[in-house]
Image (cartoon, coloured by chain):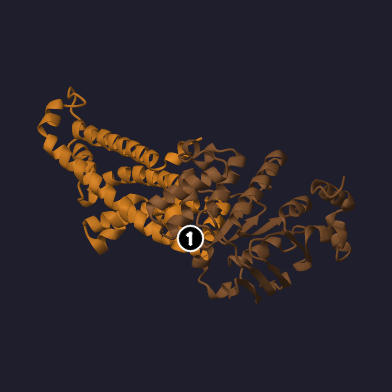
Amino acid sequence: MAQRGATVTFEDVSKTYAGGSAALVDLTFTVPSGAICALVGPSGGGKTTALKTVNRLVEPTSGRVLIDGVDVMTVEAVALRRRIGYVIQHIGLFPHRTVAQNVATVPELVGWPRDRIRARVAELLDLVGLDPARYAWRYPAQLSGGERQRVGVARALAAEPPVMLMDEPFAAVDPIVRERLQDEFLRIHERLGMTVLFVTHDVDEAMKMGDAVAVLQGGRLAQFALPDELLARPANDFVREFVGLDRWRKRVERLRKAGLLA
Amino acid sequence: MTAGEPLVRWDWVAGHLDEIALRIGEHVELTAIAVGVGLLVAFALSLLVLRYGWLEQPTTFVAGTLYTIPSLALFALLVPYTGLTILTAEIGLVGYTLLILIRNIVGGIRSVPAEVREAALGMGYSRGRLLWEVELPLALPVIVAGIRIATITTIGLVTVTALIGQGGLGYLILIGIQRFFSTPLLVGAVLSVALAIAIDVALVLTQRAVTPWARAK
């Protein structure tokens, strides 16, 4: 299941609502192909809005979002979205469709042949750790929270999207399950190599999941950096505070985990 | 009713089976047209209400007002314009279904969880497919609940349309009243109730068959 990513570029992206409130202000950064970029910040900081400009659920007032150099506003919205995986906090599985039908959603929308869909669904359920024989015929109401999240991830991956948008995907499950889902997702990402934009309000999750971290505050990019750099050189007081007063402890922990410190 | 006469004369029933079957058929037909056309009209109006929120108040007001007009008076008012025709009967009957149907269609579609809608749009559903493949199926239990009430109400109302010459089980009731003869009156009334129950059960079973997820827990 080789799958490659795509470069996602924000170019001076601003979003101003009719009332005059600015949700995004001159957002500029580039997520390299195949990287996971965590978008982190306080609520109301613009993380979700920024994410939604990529699949056009929000359209920028000015500036451009580019996927592999193509302005998303030049691509028809429905076609664009079918090529971008999307996972939200409450997942939004279709209650009236089985697990297999949910996972098959986008392949069916884009008209894959039946055999290919069936094979792909089984492959994906395996990938997210759900036995197809046990789970394919269940309805979402018959799943635990963690199982639903797994189905949500499988559904987003179904049509091999080069870009995946995840909006607090693991926020609704308990910490132990969350940790496991994070690890599993990192393992999946390592195999598939798609580009991921990952919104979270949790700094620890951002550090763990992100190859790069974008800190948003008041719709502006406070800092865009590698996790280590963010800890070592916060761009301003806000980032320093937000990243946490115990950042040194975290840094030591990371280095220890990486085997760089005894 | 003549003294000494039994409440139901079974020999009359036996001798009029053909007529009774005919009246049941008419009754079902009048009801089916009313609910079918009502559903189409209500569906179109519901889509407009969902699209343009400001239409909700006036639509509900008009449908609500229609609903409060006594059926006899409504038919009497229509006769000068549309005559003693099935059209007169159906205008009234369709009018009475609208309030309940619109309310349940709009309510059912609005009850679809926001995250389901967002996920569907985010994955590349067009508005049309979202409606037909996600919103309507999920709204089905609420919509069917509305159809059940509208159908039962209509079956009751159809007995009145016999007054404007449209047959149905009301015709038997009318004969009973005119001739002081309890048998056709009772046959008409009992069959009307039985028909309502039978169709209601059929609707419940149909809904269960097409919404298997609603029972999955």
Amino acid of disc 1: Tyr
Residue shown at the point (36%, 59%) measured from the top left: B41
Residue shown at the point (22%, 60%) measured from the top left: B83
Q: Name the image quarter holding the N terminus of chain B.
A: top left
Image height check: is A13 above or below B101? below
Q: Give the number of callouts.
A: 1
Q: Is residue B12 left or right of residue B208?
A: left
Q: Is residue B202 left or right of residue A138?
A: left
The outermost residue toward the left is B15
**Residue for badge 1:** B125
Nearest to the observer: residue B126 or residue B181: B126
User: Picture coordinates of residue B16 (x, y %)?
Assistant: 12, 35
Category of crowding for the residue at label 1, using alpha-carbon neighbours closer than 10 angstroms: few (below 14), some (14–19), many (at least 20): many
User: Picture coordinates of residue A219 (x, y %)?
Assistant: 75, 67
Picture quadrant where residue B169 is located: top left
Q: Is residue B131 visible?
A: no
Q: Colour of chain A?
A: brown
User: Picture coordinates of residue A39 (x, y %)?
Assistant: 72, 60
Picture quadrant where residue B151 is located: top left
Q: Is residue B213 left or right of residue B92?
A: right
Tag 1, which secondary structure?
A: loop
Q: Is residue A195 left or right of residue A141?
A: right
Q: Colour of chain B?
A: orange
Chain ID at mark 1? B
Nearest to the observer: residue A95 or residue A1: A1
The outermost residue toward the top is B4
User: Picture coordinates of residue B23 (x, y %)?
Assistant: 19, 42
Q: Is residue A203 visible?
A: yes
Residue shown at the point (55%, 58%) measured from the top left: A3
Nearest to the observer: residue A83 or residue B208: A83
